[in-house]
Amino acid sequence: MAQSGLFFRKKNAGLAKRVLDFYEDVRYRYLSAREDPTEYGKDWRKSVKKIRDDFDGLSSFTNEMKRYLDEDVVFDKNALDAESSQARDLYAQIKRMRYNSDEVNDPFAKQLGDNVIETFVTEPSIYAMFIHYALRTHAHSISAAAWEKNDVNIGNISEGAMGLDLRLDDIPIYIIEHYGDDKDTSKVKPKFKPALELLKKVFLVDNTEEDWEALIAIRLKKAKEEKSEEEKEETDFIVPNKPMYRIFEVNDIKDLKGFSGEWVVQEKYDGIRVQLHKIKDKVKIYSYNEKDITSKCKDIVDKLDQKRFGDSIFDAEIILYDGDEPLHRADTIAHLFKGKYPEAKLKARVFDILHHEGKNVTDTPLRERINILFYQLAQHSSDELGFPNKKNTRIADSLSEIEKYSKDIMELPTSEGVVIKDIESTYYIGSRKNPKWIKLKKFVDLDLIVLDKKSTKSNLNSYTLGAGPLSGEEAREHGGTELKGLKYLAVGKALNTKEKVDVGDIVRVKVDEVRKNNGGYKLYTAKVIEIPEVDAPEKLITLDLLSKEGRKSLKYDVKDALTKFVITDGVHGEADIIMKSDFEGFTVYGFSGDSLMEKNALADMDMWKHEIEELMKAKSGDARVAIKAYLQEIDTEEKGLHINEIFNFCKEKIPKLVEDLWSGEIKRMVNWMNDQDDFIKVSKDKYTANRDKLIKAEKTPKNGKFLLYHGSDDNLEMVIRTSDKEMAWTIDIEDAEDIYNLFGKSGKFPAQVSTKTTRDKLLDSGEIELGVQRHGYHEYKLNGDKFETRLHFRVVPVKKKDTWVVWTGIKQKMLDKDKDEGIWDITEDRHKKLTMQV
């Protein structure tokens, strides 16, 4: 189903959405079972049983079902057989419910019934009216007088119905998906352009060209050359989706919410992620970082070039083989980019399809994408180009099945684990992380320090590996090996590797298991896989988490010196990190529980240290701004205010910062103020503001940093730092799912220039590139740990009121800089006072 992107009525159409989702689910299962009862009959029977359960319920949805479904048909035993007349009747009644229910805001289905497609392709005026309904964000149609001036005399079908707010290019697809069941839809796309041209003529009777541009502004590019460039990018490289979630055992899935309960379990290959493109008979192969590697994959190109494969884009992994033996990922990289192993052979293993027979299928449920691969393409598998099969891809509807299939798949020699995907998941465009995908590895990656090394004459190296550094208590308990004044615990060896490093370096190893061993820890089958870009090894607490005896975090008594600090990645929940912090820095002691978020946070401790550091810098900046403004307002003669007066102001106005930065102690605040250039000490206990320190912002900054927070009011806050300037956007969302509707599904949400921020929970941070900046439009490219995408803020009319709207660019190419007007400081934008209230 196409994503509407509606942002002003998210919660008031629950029953309508349930009716539509119900129909789409039944439709898919019925048509699949009717076509292939052996394979899909089980799914249809499940669907019928679910219909019966709902029919016997007490909800408003049950009441709606009873208006259209005959009880005798619902409970007829023959309805379980998809090929029976009773099943056909049941499906027909459900279809009638979808098209006639008063709960469904679809005026065209109600008035045209089952003849929507036929009417659209034979009556351009009705098609044009639907396009306006699909584009608009309000409930008002074009006046009858405007239609009459273009010699069209029709009723006002869509007046009073809230628009769909679809992208222009999605409208034909939406029509086919929603009204095309058992219909000839071949004329829907050819008839679209003339209907759009008619709509423009009618629309301009009562509106201006600027109004027309506003209607389609966030869907259609103004300049032809811009449009053709964007269209050219349509089938270009698509940012590869990766699993949003990371689990350590199958039961961890119980901690995750928002899944359908049916899963696709797929092999996670130990190779290189690639995209295979065949567009207009031209084959291109791109690596995971968008490098063109076509020339290095001749055998794969030759297979894909065959006529049996039409226009397609495949998500795949390339693996290097020495005969029948799959080699390690590092060997594949060395072969691709350094020309090593000339006798070895590259093979591609496809696991998803993004473009099929000229159609973008990223918004199609995985259930249907997998069916394309299974039933249309698997028969064409070869040694060089393989498609999913029952060995590497399984359908599961319970955790026990996931467990069984995962173990089976992990036995495959090319597997490094599995990816567990919601069967209804779509492919998120513009986002690296898919919130419906889960990663489970059969081994653990650990960063460990080299404590000792031995080399052979054949240039193979063996390393003794350690974790730490040890705290005083840990050192007393375990002893340890001293290195550069710090102690580390030896936990295992990595034998006979070609990687050459020195004592004191950090290596990343793959281990099959971590066990407690005589009070310490032991790694099993550790293998060096790469040299990571980190400067510290894992702490013992991480090994404790991953040890087989139990993944329990260390427990701490939170005393005066230690505080709980809540962190979240917006995905796995929240974790209480035990730390001691002040403006000079912080020390992390561990976590207070054993939730899935805490497991992930421990495994990614270096990342969280960085993000907490960024958060503490932001808090320090907020305190500095607040105190300086207070001093400038009160101490006009610059004689200084007593530190007690300043401290009392802070306790009243910024109490949380007083605790977070200075642990509520005035002495700590004094030390902090002495370290800031914004304040001048005029006597022993008095300070004034440094009025000579001016912010000199870069005139036209191109890059900076961003921090994305999830506020206590459930809104998002995106802080942007460029040179010495800090500014922020507030984005109106209602729940965590909206975060991924924004960053992965191009959903559109209201926004406003922030006057203040709460910075509650840090979701992501990273580099930001500033694109075109002008009054009413700001373009950014985010490159964070979780989100890597192009983001737009634009002023558009919503319910006839100008509103800032933010959405993710489906195309990742930035606009030409000649459209930039240099209004990069959003606090100087003439629309800065617009609010999110619509």
Image: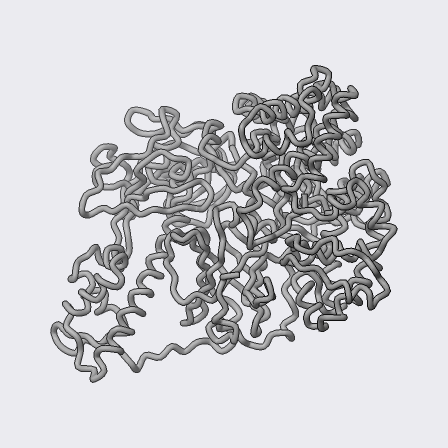
| Residue 133 to residue 520: above or below | below
Give x and y (percent) for residue 489. Answer: 31, 36
Q: From the image, which quarter does the N terminus lie in?
A: top right
Where residue 366 sits: x, y (%)? 66, 37
Q: Residue at x 77, y 40 (%)?
A: 299
Q: Is residue 276 above or below residue 774?
A: above
Q: Position of residue 370 (x, y in %)?
A: 69, 34
On the question of residue 382 being in view, the answer is no
- The vertical placement of 202 against 187, above or below, is below
As drawn, the residue found furthest toward the top would be 77
Residue 454 placement (x, y as % from top left): 42, 37
Find the residue positioned furthest to the bottom: 637
Apparent side of residue 424 relative to residue 714 in the rendered image (left or right): right
| Residue for point 79% across, 29% down | 379
Q: Residue furthest left?
A: 684
- Left or right: where does residue 576 sit relative to residue 310? left
